[in-house]
Image (cartoon, coloured by chain):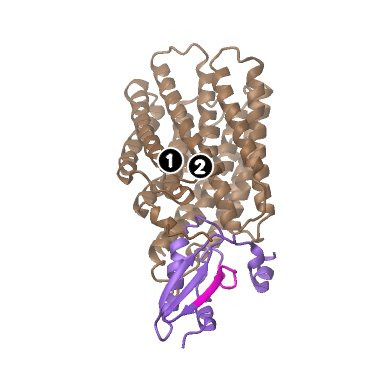
Chain colours: A brown, B purple
Amino acid sequence: MINTNSIASSYSPPIKIVIKYMGTAVLAFVLLTFLQLLEYETITGHHFQPKILALTHIATLGWITMIIFGALFQLVPVVLEVKLFSEVLAEIQYWIYLIGAAGLVYGFWVFDSKNFIMPSAIVLNAAMLIFAFNMIMTFIRVKKWNITGYYLAAAVFYLIVTAVAGLLLSINLYTPYIKINHLQYLNLHAHIAFVGWVSFVVMGVTYKLIPMFTLSHKYSTKSALGAFVLINTGLLGISTAMHYENTTIFFYFFVILIAVGIFLFLYQVYMIFKNRVRRKLDVGLELSVAAFIFFGISTLTGLITGVGNLSDVRNLSLIYGYLIVFGYLSMLIIGQLHKILPFLRWYHKYSSKAGKENVPMLKDMYSEKVGYSILYLMLSGMAVLTISFILDIQIGVLIAFILFFTASILFMINMITVLRR
Amino acid sequence: MVTEELVRQKLKSVIDPEVGFNIVDMGLVYGIDIKDKKVIITMTLTTPGCPMHDSITEWAERVVKQLDPVMDVKINLVWEPQWTPDMMSNEIKELLGY
């Protein structure tokens, strides 16, 4: 028998810093859906437009990455059974990161590379380096490595690659020096961000959280390892190939490797769900399942776009972007926050009261009805938006954006409900 | 007098807030030993690294301490044998559709 005196959650940083990151992210999501609603007329056609670049960075930096930072400060200690190296650094990083992200978004909005875009990229790089340092110093203390740990370590590496590539792009906007096409390099920056940074975190955390929530047992984890090898090879491959003007056959080879890797991950997720003990899924998990399906659809779209050289087809890159940002990542984050935030709140408010007085269950911490409304709004929004982009119906785009905005408000309300319980 | 059955009854009020079932019916309590004035509870959780770790163990300790006469309570958290869904009571298995 193995005795353990270690108390996993005593490794966790104070709820304050996690809530600060997550709260800012939720506000960023509301801002994102609001601004795109205001700017709906500009969001068609080519993706390289100031307003779209600004919105993309509210999504990636303000919403997605902000959430990931908060989630990792909470989850790394739990998953790897180690104390976070520095809470002070996490706090300092927050402010530097917030200034950098706000400056960059504003810089894109007014398209001022000299005064805003480039300086903000430097500030953001500083914030990312602080995060990476904090994580690496935490990783060093880990005694028992697991598959989640490998994914998270790789994700931190790709975050830095993404940030440096972003900085190089911002300098290129000011004084062009990159020999290959700016858009090709932007494409690489975006894919390293979405696959290397964001999706590696998603995958690593999924292997730990989904079995925990569904009580899954007795499944093989070979696919998780296979996905790790294939996606890393593919990412390092395109990072090399796409630095050349003529990306040759290697580009296709590595893109296919990444896609196969992602499908291996999705197969692993399917196996986890298939072997679950809790048959009925709650709204958080239903949102997550929808998100995983969108991950598959977006990967297929990306594969067809990349290999088929279809990036000039009208609105295709927009559809691809929305499938990733709204279909896959936003739905996943909304779903998972319906699991993580109630836990955090419960833990801090009710943990010490349990046994002395009646305490709520996690599912009672928010409104399930509101949760399902968010799910249906997001799903119908995605459907209306995709059709409207394909058929070029402007009013459809507007309707979809109203649906997304409503979803973001309901989401904020449900999260506030959790915090007020 | 504190008996194993009384302790077990008390532990049934400890509920995993995520799953919504008590730890006894979940099959998480492996053993209850009562020696002199001490209750030793050997238990596990559904997964190592579970963030509910200390919430649940402290909850268990708290409720058993409510027994009369008050006794020392020690929670012995173990990971072997590993918990499996087969350890759940038939009632829960049915409720979960397992």
Residue at image point 65% right, 51% down: A272
Horizontal placement of A91 versus B52: left or right? Answer: left
Residue nearer the viewer, A59 or A341: A341
Chain assignment, label 1: A
Q: Which residues are magenta?
A: B20-33
**How far across and how far down the image is residue B79, in percent?**
54, 59
**How far across and how far down the image is residue A48, in percent?**
51, 24
Q: Which mark is residue A82?
A: none
Pointers 2 and 1 in contact (CB under 8 A)?
yes
Residue at image point 41% right, 66% down: A351
Chain assignment, label 2: A
Q: Which residue is mark 2?
A: A149
- Can see residue A35? no
- Can see residue A10? yes
**Which SS class for mark 1?**
helix
From this view, report whether residue B35 is shown above or below residue A179.
Answer: below
